[in-house]
Amino acid sequence: MTPFDYSGKQALVIGGSTGIGNAIAQMFRQCGASSHVTGTRTHASDYSPSDLSNMEGLSYSQLDLSHPDALSQWDHGFEALDALVICHALSLFNGEEFEADVFRNVVEINLNSVFDCAQRFKPMLAPTKGSIVIVSSLAAYRTIPMQPAYTASKSALLGLVRALSMAYVKEGVRVNGLAPGLVETKMGKAGHPDFSELVKKTVRRIPARRTADPSEMAGPALFLCSPLASYIIGQTLVVDGGMSLTS
Ligand SMILES: NC(=O)c1ccc[n+]([C@@H]2O[C@H](COP(=O)([O-])OP(=O)(O)OC[C@H]3O[C@@H](n4cnc5c(N)ncnc54)[C@H](OP(=O)(O)O)[C@@H]3O)[C@@H](O)[C@H]2O)c1
């Protein structure tokens, strides 16, 4: 068995309908796992390639974590999980996150519901000695001034990863984080009418001189879940083409 052979394993990607989460779910599938994703829309067929979504071979559930009871009411049917990737997030632009209600809502989804997901699925990961990867952001290290809730919640995930990793390792569950740099997904495009201009400007500050393909987040996520990472606990891996090295 190779370390990236996930044959017979079950992976769950919360926020795996599109973008980075979808690429991670697809890589789990390519490596032999049964791969389940969630998103906010009713059916898998509601997503299209233009959303950076490929549902081929994945199973899907609707899970909108802006509804307080959504997680507890989700009848997912998993008895055991080998890998849980918590990848969903909300990101609002144009200063909207300075509204108190909006700020709280973003923190609810990007931080509190991440904790809820980890707690809900830990009992299913313990019997398999499975792994959790929590997707944070380079925003945890580099401030986005017009997005106080996104910046604060993604920063808080670094601490959540550390705390959960120490608590869960007693039951054999490893917890780590992943902090992507810039990836051109629907999250960024939805909020910026001039997203391509923003990308052009940002790329000048990325040593790799390009944005990442979502699949370039999938390799690191699978690595963190694999036996190759068996001694890595409570770390958040920055995958940013070197952007964090620049001023
Ligand atoms: N793109 C980047 O440059 C970048 C950089 C750093 C970190 N990240 C992080 O990477 C992760 C994935 O983002 P992405 O860029 O791949 O964007 P994306 O394609 O828009 O994916 C976001 C995912 O979160 C889900 N989601 C949104 N609101 C939700 C809610 N209320 N309840 C449950 N699920 C919800 C989305 O479901 P629907 O598809 O139904 O909307 C989708 O599955 C996020 O945590 C983001 O913060 C992204």
Image (spheres, rainbow, N blue to C red):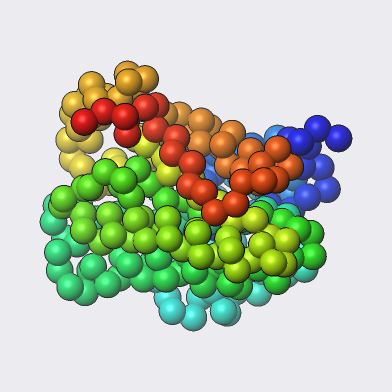
From the top left corner, tell me how far across and down residue 84 is, in percent: 62, 56
83 to 33, vertically: above or below: below
Residue 102: horizontal and vertical position, in percent? Answer: 23, 68
Residue depicted at 83% across the width and 48% down the height: 8
Q: Quadrant of the C terminus?
A: top left
Query: Which residue is depicted at the point 33% across and 61% down?
Result: 153
For the point 40% across and 65% down, which residue is it?
111
Name which quarter of the figure residue 244 lies in.
Answer: top left
Which image quarter is the N terminus in?
top right
Q: Is residue 44 visible in the rendered structure shown here?
A: no
Q: Could one spot residue 3 in this view of the protein?
A: yes
Q: Nearer the viewer, residue 235 or 55?
A: 235
Q: Residue furthest right?
A: 1
Q: Residue at x 18, y 40 (%)?
A: 193
- Image location of residue 237, percent across then percent down: 49, 41
Relative to 141, 28 lies left or right: right
**Left or right for 54, reference 181:** right
Residue 130: image location, x then y, percent:
71, 56
